[in-house]
Image (cartoon, rainbow, N blue to C red):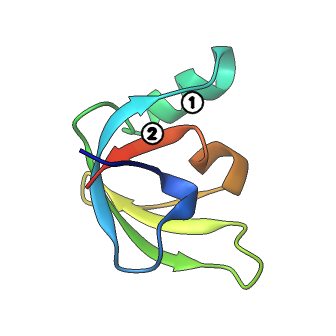
Amino acid sequence: MEEKKLSELLPNEEGDVVRVAGEGKLRRRLFDMGITPGAHIVMRKKAPFGDPIEVTVRGYELTLRKDEAACVFLGQ
């Protein structure tokens, strides 16, 4: 299975979270937002320069910074 960072997805691409990198507060914040291994994520929109991005996870819309999204690895 190919792994891809959430920050690399194009609009309408999707995948399941394989792992979440990062440490401390950032990792905990992503987990608190529902971005955990096994969660299905759909990329909705990217700002013109790629930051921030909007995704759908667990049935709700979520906006993330590009550096946060780079910590989330998806399998497609």
In this view, 52 is above or below 64: below
State left or right for residue 12 relative to residue 29: left
Location of residue 63 in the rendering, given as x and y in whole percent from the top left corner: 57, 61
In this view, 47 is above or below 39: below
State left or right for residue 65 relative to residue 62: right
Residue type for callout 1: Arg
- Mark 1 highlights which residue? 29
Q: Label 1: how many residues lie within 10 Å, few (<14), some (14-19) or many (20+)? A: few
User: For the residues marked 1 and 2, what is the alpha-carbon distance in whole angstroms?
Assistant: 6 Å
Residue type for callout 2: Met
**Quadrant location of the N terminus in the rendered image:** top left
Circle number at residue 66: none
- Mark 2 highlights which residue? 33
Location of residue 28 in the rendering, given as x and y in whole percent from the top left corner: 54, 21
In this view, 50 is above or below 29: below
Instruction: Farthest residue to the front: give it.
Output: 1
Of residues 62 and 67, the one drawn nearer to the viewer in this rendering = 67
